[in-house]
Image: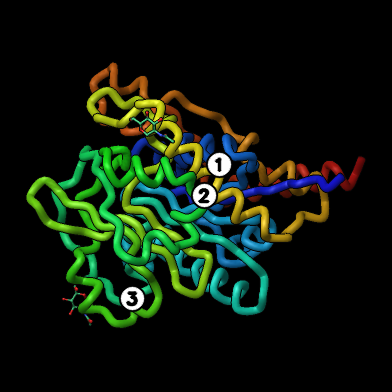
């Protein structure tokens, strides 16, 4: 019997709802991966490059979540995602299959990095705007959509089951204007914002297992934010489940392993507290996530891990 131990890494970011100097991951991304059979090892935005690389080599897949971060070099989230992107290309180039997916902010970050153009994103009126996906001629043959059951794909194209919640985005025209991006990504679907502007809603790299959705597959099943129209129809929940199955299925094709079981235990997200952040909504604060994981500053996490290692060595 083969023991399948697939792990996937979402990247934690600074900002609301995390306390000062802490990073967070909305728990919906963690549940999304866990629901498809992966365990989660976080990569923190304030980790130094050596630790980012160590975790890259430990996990089987990467997820760049949504949120709001400064997408310029010198900003921690952007720099970590840039490093992960480069490690992903290098790994795949030498035959080490490593999948990477970006959602919303993750999509936008990948668009900036792959296009090498820091002004590629435009403004869109698509906050809280679940939408259908309009497939291009590349969609049907893509890895991403051909892996979904055809009814799920069909429902995504006919019903507003793709939860869109963004103010930045990639204009349909920006693709044509940026040849570097055209060479890297196939545009699989477009969507339209409230003002009728078309933007890229799904893309897949031509030569790498890299996918990006401007929409949020994880929210349908796992976020119940009071003031948002997140689709919760059973068919929309199936979208969450099938996209999760696709991403974790890709991660199962990767052979990265962590040698020391206790090192692995130390890295898992289970070591961190799950906080009911959605509660703040009832108390009048702006919070988009029902539950979140908070991570102390990396220096503190690192010191705690080192202490655990030394205690084990002494035992
Ligand atoms: C970057 O993308 C924007 C939006 O498509 C475009 O107007 C601009 O010319 C691009 N810049 C470069 C240097 O290619
Ligand atoms: C597609 O949507 C319809 C109606 O919303 C639903 O009855 C059907 O079960 C859905 N199919 C899948 C595979 O989710």
Circle 3 SS class? helix
| Between 72 and 170, the one nearer to me in the picture | 170
Circle 2 SS class? strand
Which of pointers 3 and 2 indicates the residue nearer the eye? 3
Residue, disc 1: 33
Label whose residue precedes the other's in the sequence (3 or 2): 2
Specify whether residue 76 is in view.
no
Residue, disc 2: 10
- Identity of the residue drawn at 64% across and 58% down: 55
Q: Tell me which corner region of the image, top left, top right, bottom left or bottom right, holds residue 77.
A: bottom left
Residue occupying the far left of the picture: 195
* Quadrant in which ligand 2 is drawn: top left
Q: Tell me which corner region of the image, top left, top right, bottom left or bottom right, holds residue 116.
A: bottom left
Q: Which mark is residue 181?
A: 3
Q: How many marks?
A: 3
| Residue 100 located left or right of residue 133 | right
Q: Whole-percent x and y of residue 308?
A: 76, 42
């Amino acid at each position: 019997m083969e023991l399948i131990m697939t792990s996937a890494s979402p990247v934690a970011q600074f900002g609301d709802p995390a306390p000062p100097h802490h990073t967070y991951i909305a728990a919906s991304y963690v549940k999304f991966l866990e629901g498809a059979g992966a365990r989660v090892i976080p990569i923190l935005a304030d980790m130094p490059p050596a630790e980012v690389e160590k975790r890259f080599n430990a996990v089987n897949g990467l997820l760049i979540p949504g949120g709001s971060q400064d997408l310029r070099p010198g900003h921690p989230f952007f720099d970590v995602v840039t490093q992960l992107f480069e490690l992903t290309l290098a790994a795949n180039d030498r035959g080490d299959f490593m999948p990477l997916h970006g959602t919303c902010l993750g999509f936008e970050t990948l668009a900036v990095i792959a296009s090498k153009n820091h002004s590629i994103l435009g403004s869109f009126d698509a906050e809280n705007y679940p939408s259908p996906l309009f497939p291009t001629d590349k969609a049907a043959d893509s890895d991403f959509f051909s892996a979904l059951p055809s009814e799920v794909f069909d429902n995504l194209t006919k019903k507003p089951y793709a939860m869109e919640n963004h103010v930045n985005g990639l204009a349909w025209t920006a693709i044509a204007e940026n040849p570097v991006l055209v060479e890297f990504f196939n545009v699989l679907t477009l969507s339209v914002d409230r003002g009728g502007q078309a933007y890229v809603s799904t893309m897949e790299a031509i030569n790498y297992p890299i996918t990006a959705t401007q929409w949020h597959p994880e929210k349908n099943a796992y976020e119940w934010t009071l003031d948002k129209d997140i689709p919760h129809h059973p068919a929309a929940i199936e979208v969450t489940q099938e996209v999760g199955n696709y991403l974790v299925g890709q991660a199962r094709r990767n052979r990265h392993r962590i040698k020391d079981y206790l090192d692995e235990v130390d890295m898992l997200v289970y070591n961190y507290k799950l906080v009911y952040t959605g509660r703040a909504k009832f108390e009048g604060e702006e919070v988009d996530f029902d539950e979140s994981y908070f991570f102390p500053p990396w220096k503190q996490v690192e010191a705690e891990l080192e202490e655990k290692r030394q205690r084990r060595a002494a035992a």
